[in-house]
Amino acid sequence: MQNTNPHAVLLASPGMGHFIPAVELGKRLATHHGFDVTVFVVAADASITESPLFKPPRTPNPLNLVLLPPVDISTHVDSTASVVTQLVIMMREALPLLRAAISAMKYHPTTLIVDMFGTEALAIAEEFDMLKYVFITSTAWFLAVTVHFPYIDEEAEHQHRVMKMPLDIPGCRSLRYEDTLDLFLDQTDRNLFSAFARVGMEISNADGILVNTWQDLEPLTLRALENEKFLGQVMKASVYPVGPLVRPIGQSSKSEVMDWLDVQPTESVIYVSFGSGGTLSVKQTSELAWGLELSQHRFIWVVRPPVDGDASANFFNVTNSHDGTPSYLPNGFYTRIRNRGMVVPMWAPQTEILAHKSIGGFFSHCGWNSTLESMVNGVPMVAWPLYAEQQMNAAMLAEELEVAVRPKIQPNAGVIEREEIAGMVRRVMELKGNEMRDKVKELQRSANQALMQGGSSYNSLSRVSKECELKLHRLSAMALG
Ligand code: UDP
């Protein structure tokens, strides 16, 4: 049976970095393009339902948000497997649950949209005669690397992986070894390597690829992806830049940290956070604390207990000294930074913080959602990439867009000392700050324009919407015989 609106089913893989943009895409499809939307969420456990995103909003909810029953992957991989391997297995195990949920729907959905970890579910879209899209929650440049990857020959792979030479991507900025993806650096895990190649092929066979970027942010890469040569050889799907889709500010943002920000001078505070999963070593955490202190700038730091390789267990038995400073931070830190710094354990209301007028910089791990949140608020960055494609994001921010400074060595290649950290904070907050701020405010304006009715991202999503409406009409005509 058919509904009168196209119905999009979105599948979000585990992790806030995938869940948040999936929800935002769903909301946009529902509120601007007349879709019915169901977002299926795969999670390791049910704790994600504690997220405010799962709480019923005060305004009518445009989405149907459904947590699929948590999947158990312990019989398939051990807990030391890479995060990517675990994600791939979790998504595979969730496939029967997705199939059953779609099959039980009263109205036949027209469209399946998965993120890059959900590409095996595209076969389910075919079973149910649905259009199939992939939503890349990162840059067009990352998409170009991913779809090009299965087609690089052994020689090029050897040159990049072993000889540490740049990897050429047709028509795009080449990928320097120092900025490359984790899986190129890991010389041992061939499974990861082949899983990534499979994903690259599956993405290019979708009906379309939505990317959380916008035309004016990555014009050259987007043009390269549209180029006959790139498409002809590698990719069959059209690319739709639909971003930046970021979480809006919550309705009630009263908290200690927001109260503190309210009384700080305009653009005087640097916000320090490494996303939902980023963790630093013991030594690096201590150097960062000293660096922030040395910089003499105001800061908010979302702190997690440090982890050194696998020797992490004891660090969760944190003790606090007399002024409340946890044992993994320098002794007396809380006393010395009082009035100037605020430490928030584990999680902070990031979108609200970045939108606050007192914020003048963002010290970030360069996860793509965090990066977009910084751009749409016109905030320059200290780029401190940790894993996944974050080095690529950092390179683009610092060298191409010139809205960030970067440390001299990669944060995961050694400890960055306090003097360098203090220097980077000063460059963003004082020395290079105005120059970078002007550039990032220009990006903020172009992001807003892209999303407005008639803007490039709005129009991209309208094109997707047209395809889905056509599909709906075809399905309806078939149902009527
Ligand atoms: N986030 C937050 N508070 C925190 C840490 C993260 O609200 O203390 C949100 C952040 O605003 C962003 C998402 O979690 O929307 C993290 O996504 P990102 O792609 O930046 O990084 P990931 O967590 O995937 O590495």
Image (tube, rainbow, N blue to C red):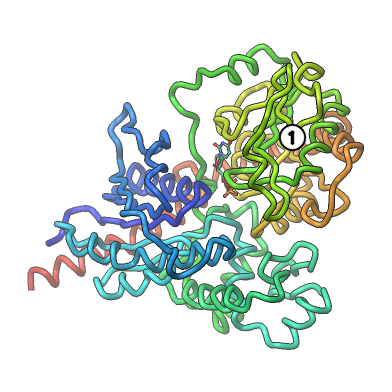
Q: Is residue 10 left or right of residue 386?
A: left
x and y percent of residue 210 in the render? 48, 60
x and y percent of residue 443 in the render? 66, 42
Q: Is residue 24 left or right of residue 125?
A: right
Say if 216 sits above or below 440 in the image.
below
Q: Residue at x 82, y 34 (%)?
A: 425
- Would you identify the image quadrant in which residue 388 lies? bottom right
Q: Residue furthest bottom?
A: 154
Residue type at the position of mark 1: Tyr
Q: Nearer the viewer, residue 299 or 32?
A: 299
Residue 374 visible from this viewpoint: yes
x and y percent of residue 451 in the render? 50, 44
- Disc 1 marks which residue? 328
Residue 267 visible from this viewpoint: no
Q: Residue at x 67, y 46 (%)?
A: 279
Say if 349 sits above or below 66 in the image.
above
Q: Residue at x 65, y 64 (%)?
A: 221
For the N terminus, the image quarter is bottom left
x and y percent of residue 90 in the render? 43, 63
- Would you identify the image quadrant in which residue 47 lies? top left
For the C terminus, the image quarter is bottom left
Say if 397 sits above or below 105 in the image.
above
Q: Which quadrant of the figure shows ligand 1?
A: top right
Say if 169 sits above or below 22 in the image.
below
Q: Residue at x 79, y 51 (%)?
A: 411
Is the CB–ligand 1 distance for label 1 below 8 Å?
A: no
Q: Is residue 45 left or right of residue 79?
A: left
- Would you identify the image quadrant in which residue 194 lies? bottom right
